[in-house]
Every structure is written in structure tokens, then in C-alpha cells.
Image (tube, grey):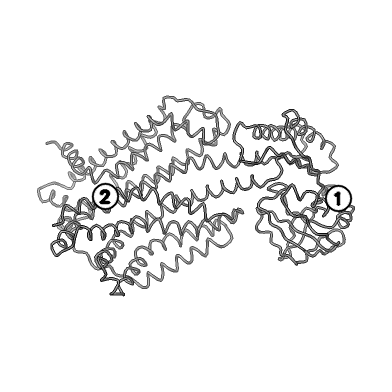
Amino acid sequence: MSFPQFAFNNVRRGARTYMAFFLSSAFMVMIFFSYSVFMYHPGVTSIEMGENSAAGMMIASYIVFIFAFFFVMYSISAFLKLRNQEFGILMILGARPGQINRLIMLENMLIGLLSIVTGMAAGMLLSKLFLLLSTKAMGIDNLPFYWPVKALVTTSTAFIALFLANSVFTLLFIRKNQVLELLKGSVKPKKEPKVSWLLSILGLALLTAGAYFIWTPLSPLSLLSAAVTGIPGTYFFYSQLSVLGMRLLKISRKRVWRGTNLLWISEMSYKIKDNARMLFLVTVVTSLACMAAGFLLSVSQSNRTGYMNSPFGIIYTIYDRGAAAADTGRQKILSTLEQNGIKYTENKVNFIRSSIKDQRDKFKSVMLLPFSRFNQLAGQIESNALPALTDGEAVLMLNPRYRDVKFDSGQTVSLPAPNEQKLALKQVQTPEAMPFGQYTAPVLIVSDGYYEQAAAAADRSNLMEYYLYNIPDWGDAPPKAGEPETVISSELETWSRNWNSANDNWDTLISTSAGDYMASKQGTSMLSFIGIFIALIFSLSSASFLYFKLHAELNADMKMYHSLSKIGLSVREMSAAATRQIALLFYIPILVAAVQTLVVIRPVLYQISIRNVTMPVLVTAAAFLAVQTVYFIIVRSRYIHSLKKMMV
């Protein structure tokens, strides 16, 4: 038997061990290849959003490749540790270190090449479907199928280099060990897991510090501090705090001695301690995937809510009320709506730009609106009519996007003009969406008398005119590409930009709720499409880690349960104890990742004025839980099946 045949037989005999690793690697190759097919498509640069989408795919492929590098390195090093005894026997039989290195290299490259070929073959089969789905999800023109030579070369070169580099790097693990140490392998008796109170307190302090930093005002420094403290804190959670928790479970003898609790609680202390690094890795990977998915889901939901609560489909803003060209845009809107047979209601509103001092004596921009005009619009913006205001009273309508602007009812605010007027805030309202445009400043509703005084004293540049178009046929449901609402909105916004640019006049602007919605949707759709596949890679890799660790411990568990069956442990009791252990390993990282995601993502989204965070995060965690449950059922079934063979 030649040396390559010997390596091939080793891989074939260990197929069950390598299967999860092989499938995960092939899946990563497939996703990387699919992204490359899109990036190198000859037609991608000629379509709108094509270059941006290709750039997004490129960044995603880098993420996949970097993650694949660490995943392969961790998996190969773990496989080598499992085979220490086998290498020790080979050395006793006369194998030189160089031959063992060659054997390891051949085996790794064999698995790597199989993964690359399988991944690219699957990618080729699915490339047409991938192009169709990607263009559909991103809302761009269809890309026809082509022969992806560049993608094939890039993917094969990148992953051959990846497996080669990892194979060389991991040889360092075997070269440092002596024969006797190798022969002991994984059969060395385990020491009882110990807990360091100092490290436990340090872990708790790091987690607390991470939560504190993430709740401070968002900045690169606060995010870096949260990562530097939170990630090590997560590791100490598994290596110290979780073992401490298992110790505390043992305090109650009544609970420990009930049924098979003693069996699984005692064994879990060893498993959690032994698998601390793996559980930590799975938790970090799952947390990143949950955070990315939760973020995108929250932004998408906020965009949908903002659109559904926008009462005006078209807003024409004239920043200089006396601008000579102001009527041009209005005529364009009216003619477009009438040509398309769209029913509408036009509302003209005159605002005055001003400012008020907040609680920290900082000026905040506001727009003054007369009380009578607000009450005329109340029915259209789904607001209650206001009671009469005196010249010293006002009602403030805050924009939910600007959470840093904080005022309370009863507070007195001062305006610089006219005459440093002080007004008592009779009400402070925060609607779901700002009815006068999602980026407009807060609106201060004042009495008609005070408004007239302010208008007389204001500069011309502070007098703004809004034309708000309520269109009954629009707004019942989020628009889709190609619908009249989307087409007309896009036409008007494009016309406005082109007209302003051609005349070098930016005193007017047409904005539409459908245009804002579609622009935000296109951005999040691309990220969501890319993120789904990365999240799938993370999820599959996590399951691969867990499967491998359980498989590595299977022989030891089989011996233990065989001995216990001799003294009366039934198959049902064995199954219950083993199921609890596997369930804890699978579900603890999901639980910790969900908590971490809620802690991290909430303040980040609050900074961009997205308040509805809990539900999107729970939906994301539930999706990961469902996928993980499928892996759990498969792994548990195979694991219990193997253990049953050893029961007497």
C-alpha cells in the first residue's frame, strides 16, 4: 500500500468524524463561489446599483474567507488532538516525524480538495438560481447565466491556499509532543473541574463593563471598549461562571439525588469545562449572526412602520418662500398626478424656521406652525385637534428620529425672536412618524397671534413653504417595484434633482414617502440577502463544532454508560441523561447569544431612533433556535443510537 493510499484509507475510515467538517467547508466554498459569480458577472457594472451590490458581495466573500480560515484551523487542530494515540503508535512502529507530517498534509489536502470540488460543483448548479434570487432581492435588473471562469479560478486558488496554510500551521501541534505523551492521547484521567473565584469575579466584572460601555453614547471608542471587555467576559462565563453554576446545583442533595440528576449534573461540569473554548466560539459566532440579522430586521420594520404612518405621499418643500422658481416644481407635481389620473388633496403650509433652548441650554431647531392651520390638518395626520392656545403657550411635536431632542410638558422654552419670547409647553407629542417629512425638525405649534408676530420679524430665508399631497390610493401597503406609486414617485424625485442641478438652484425639493421607503429597502435587501448566507454558514459551523466535540467524547461516554448499565441504568434513563447534556450544549450558546444581542443591539439602534428592537431580536433568535433544533434532533438521534449499542 502506497503512502497516498494509506492517507486515503485513513480519511475513508474516519468519514463519520470528518462528515460535518467536510459539509461545512463545502458550504463555505459554495457561498464564496456564488458571491464571486455575481462579482465577476460582465453585466453587473452596466446596471443601476450593480457596482454597489458587487462591492457588498466582495466584502461578504472576505468575511466568509476569514471565517473559513479560522474554522478550518480550529477543526484540523482538534482532529489532530483526537488522533494523538494513533500518531504515537505510528512512531513506535518506526514512522519518522517527517512521514507523519506528510500523512497529515495529504489527509488535510484530500479533504480540502474534495470540499472545494463539491462546493464549486454545487455552486455551479445553483449559480443561475443564485443570480435570479440576488437580483430579485436587491431589486435590480436580471443577470443572465455565464461561464464563470474568474470565479472558478479565484475560489479554487483561495481555498487551496487556505487548506495548505492551515495544514502547515497545524503541524506545529504534533511536532512538539513526545511519543509517551501522544500515546496517553485523550485517555488521560480527567481532573475535577475547579473554579477560580478571582476569575469568576473578573468574568462578571468584564460582562458588566461590556454592558456599561455599550449603553454609553455610541462612538468607536465605546464599541471597542464593549468588545474588549464583553468577549473575554463571555469566555470566563463558560470557563468559570458556568462551572460555578453547576457546583451550586450540587448544593441541594435532594435535587441532585432525584432520578438521574446526579449523572448528568456531574458529567456536565466536565463537559462545560472541557468545551469552554468551543462553546465560547459558538456563542460569539451565533451572537454576531443574531446581531446582524436583528439589526437588519429592525431597520426593515422601522422603514415599513415609517411609511405606513406617513400621511402625505408627496412633499414639495420651498426653502425660500419668495423663490422665483418655486412654482415650477408644483406645476410638475400637479401635471404628473393629473396625467396619471391620481386623486389627491393639496395642502399648503407656511413654516417659520426658529430655535428653542433645551434643558442643557443648547439651541434646537424648530419650525413654527400656527394653531389654526394645525387643527385644519389634524384629520389628515390622524391627530386630535388642539384646544386654543394663548400667546404664551405652545405645543411641541417631536420627530421620533431625533431622540436627543428632549422636552417635557410644562417646561418653559425661549425663542430668540421676537424679543426673547418665553412659551410654556402645554403638550409634547411624539408621533410614530413625522407627518411633515421624516427628516424635518420638530414643529412648535403656537397661537395665531404669536405666529403673525414671528412672521413679521423673521428674515425671508427663514420662511418656508410646504405643499403636502394626501393621496388616498397610496399608503395602504408598502409599495413594490413597478407599481404606479413607485414609478411616479421615482419620476418626480429624479425630475427634481435634475432640474435643481441643471439650474443650479436648490431652493426647492420634491420628496416622496415611496421613494424614501424604496431607497431604504434596496439597501437593507442587499445586506439581508448577503447576511442570510453568512448566518447559515455560522449556524452550520456551530453545529459542526458541537457534532465534532460530541463525537470526540463518544468513546469515553460509551464506556461510562456500559459500566453504568451493568449496575442497573436503563436505556430510558441513559437516553434522558444524555439528551439533557446534549440539549444544554446546543441551547446554552443560543440563549447567551440572544441575551447578548438584546444588550448590544438595543442601544445601537436607539442611537438611530429605532425603538422597536425586542421583537426583531426574538424573531431572529427563534429562527436560529429552529435551525439549531434540527441539528440537535439529528445529532441526538445518532448519539443515542451509538450509546444504545453499549447498554447491557
Say which amino acid is labelled 2: Ser
Quadrant assignment for the C terminus: bottom left
Q: CA distance from mark 1 to mark 2?
A: 77 Å
SS type, badge 2: helix
Q: Residues within 10 Å of mark 2 (few under 14, many from 20)?
A: few
Q: Is residue 421 above or below residue 95?
A: below
Write the residue at 75% across / 66% down. 411
The residue that label 1 is drawn on is 459
| Frontmost residue, 184 versus 176 | 184
First-in-chain label (1 vs 2): 1
Write the residue at 35% across / 69% down. 245
SS type, badge 1: loop
Number of numbered labels in the structure image: 2
Label of residue 637 in the image: 2
Question: From the viewer's perspective, is 465 left or right of 479?
Answer: right
| Frontmost residue, 648 versus 320 | 648
Residue 477 percent across, percent down from the top left: 61, 41
- Depth-wise, is mark 1 or mark 2 nearer the camera? 2
Question: From the viewer's perspective, is 74 left or right of 140?
Answer: left
